[in-house]
Image (cartoon, rainbow, N blue to C red):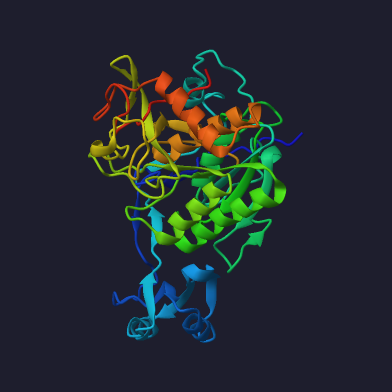
Amino acid sequence: MKKRRMLGSAILSLAMGLSMFSGGASAKTTDVKENGVQDSYRVLIQGASSEKVKLQNNYDVHRNFGKEGFTTTVNAKQYEALKKNKNITVEKVEKVEIQSKAPIKATAVPSKQVPWGIKAIYNDNNLTSPSGGDGIKVAVLDTGVEKTHIDLSQNVEQCKDFTQSSTYVNGTCTDRNGHGTHVAGTVLANGGSDKLGVFGVAPEAELWAYKVLGTNGSGYSDDIAAAIRHAADEKTRTGAKVIISMSLGSNGKDSLIASAVDYAYGKGVLVIAAAGNSGPGSNTIGYPGALVNAVAVGALENVQSNGTYRVADFSSRGNPATAGDYIIQERDIEVSAPGASIESTWINGGYNTISGTSMATPHISGLAAKIWSANKSLSNTQLRAELQKRAKAYDIKGGIGAAVGDDYASGFGFPRVK
């Protein structure tokens, strides 16, 4: 039996409180000299095939997206020269960051083996042993995953790093941040071989840990897009049922990620993404959650208001103008789930409690895996419809913007196991 790793008296701490997506995210490009002048950029170059081939011979291609162009890293002088080339279009590939704020303390053992959010989504306050998810692959695109964590190790099927090369590095997905390990635990933590750990929603699901964000919680959109496409291609190669879970995002719509989400959805993958933490104002939802082919998840608190759970103030809101019709359009919140004070797995074999729509998203990813496992004949669109149906059965009426029916704060409502 693998021994549970103890943190001892030196309690691990990490400053990673609420910001946009686990805390919040903001688009920011790095590589800045001491004098404040940016030294290098990752850029997307688009244009005629002949022109792209010519440029690919002059620059190191980071990722090639075919007709959609290719990405490369250039210095400031090269960037200015490319902008003057009338035969191409060039744009910066933005980085999206999860910013560290409030300190969070990790513990060696969980305070509860079945956190409140898991009990809530099961609609069972006496739940002691969640189940389900067998045969379903959940691709967690995040800061990586601590694949040796006792509560996760038995579920890890793929481990790949998209941050280091023009393809990916197989067999490594090291998480030095903690965020990805936390998200994965909410999806499918199994309590560990010693049964002293924490449980996720679907502890029998298989984990595809795709590292797309670095230690500081930031990553480039081209790497994220490549990971999305890879998960879709793996779905085709293996014939598996695949869910992509993304607790990340930015304020603006990125063309590479949007195209990749459409590609994956068209291949039969269900894509689930965080709404963002820029609430409670309307139209604050972030991308890729705001895309039509992604299920955008808002965050609920463990507080009762108007007879239901309450949408957290930090949870981003959708567009009031398109709410109320139970039809998903761009910038709509689709569903909501527990996202405040969520305990889950952490790096160094520990556990941690965080708030954010980053934490709400894996609850829905786990629920989707559990439903799909029990109904493998469903397509991804039918599974999405089932989530919407279950959400309607538990309408959320608490929190700013929440109202009877489809609203811009909680979407259709809170889908549950029963």
* Left or right position of 393 against 305: right
Q: How many marks?
A: 0
Residue 49 in view (yes/no): yes
* Left or right position of 315 against 108: left
| Residue 51 image offset from top left, x and y in percent | 47, 84
Residue at 71 percent across and 38 percent down: it is: 154
Say above or below: 247 vs 256. above
Q: Pick the residue in front: 367 or 127.
A: 367
| Residue 182 image offset from top left, x and y in percent | 52, 40
Q: Pick the residue in front: 277 or 369.
A: 369
Residue at 50 percent across and 40 percent down: it is: 11
| Residue 134 image offset from top left, x and y in percent | 68, 32
Q: Residue furthest right?
A: 1
Quarter occupied by the N terminus: top right
Picture quarter containing residue 166?
bottom right
Picture quarter containing residue 131?
top right
Residue 10 in view (yes/no): no
| Residue 78 image offset from top left, x and y in percent | 39, 84
Say above or below: 298 vs 264. above
Say above or below: 415 vs 323. above
